[in-house]
Image (cartoon, rainbow, N blue to C red):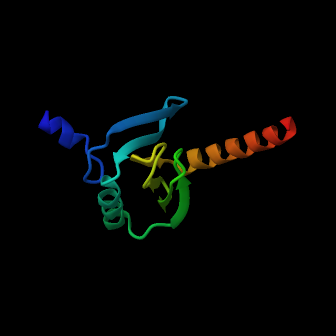
Amino acid sequence: MQACAQRNSFGGINPLSVDSEFREGKLTEVRFTISLTAFDVLTGAAKERLGEPTRVADSDVQTRAGATLQNKQITWERPTMVLTVDKYGLTIDKGMAVLTTPQEKARKLEELEQRKKKGAKDF
């Protein structure tokens, strides 16, 4: 069991969950749900391995109870991969890391833009 946990570590942390996405039979994205304490460890390992991030963004996240927390999103863009780490993921008790290809990132951004345009027409 210990060897399995070590083998599945990513950036010095053991993710809470791992999801992957395939397109046309090829792996295009891996999503890691991480603990809040893993954020600093993972981003530190990424800085050591990948150098300085391409982008660092801070944004406010509001809970259902009305509390406001500051989220931090750090991104490393390289020719063959994009790594984005968010302090808060889909919930305020877990973070998220996404490892994808530049092509898949561009495809998803284009898809989002198309949905926005379609949504505006539906108004």
Farthest left residue in view: 2
Q: Where residue 78 sits in the image (x, y, percent)?
A: 48, 60
Q: Measuring 25% from the left and 40% from the top, which residue is drawn there? A: 8
Q: Measuring 39% from the left and 43% from the top, which residue is drawn there? A: 32
Farthest bottom residue in view: 52
Is 109 rendered above or below residue 48?
A: above
Q: Is residue 79 left or right of residue 1?
A: right
Q: Does any portion of residue 100 appear in the rendered image?
A: yes
Q: Is residue 52 left or right of residue 111?
A: left
Q: Measuring 45% from the left and 54% from the top, which residue is drawn there? A: 86
The quadrant in which residue 53 appears is bottom left
Q: Is residue 59 left or right of residue 121?
A: left
Q: Where residue 45 sits in the image (x, y, percent)?
A: 30, 61
Q: Where residue 5 sits in the image (x, y, percent)?
A: 20, 39
Q: How many numbered circles does the render carry? A: 0
Q: Does any portion of residue 77 appear in the rendered image?
A: no
Q: Measuring 50% from the left and 29% from the top, which residue is drawn there? A: 25
- Observer-nearest of 111 and 15: 15
Is 20 rendered above or below residue 67?
A: above
The N terminus lies in which quarter of the figure? top left
- Observer-nearest of 116 and 69: 69
The C terminus lies in which quarter of the figure? top right
Is 95 rendered above or below residue 56?
A: above
Q: Where residue 99 sits in the image (x, y, percent)?
A: 44, 48
The quadrant in which residue 59 appears is bottom right
Farthest top residue in view: 25
Farthest front residue in view: 65
Q: Is residue 23 left or right of residue 121?
A: left
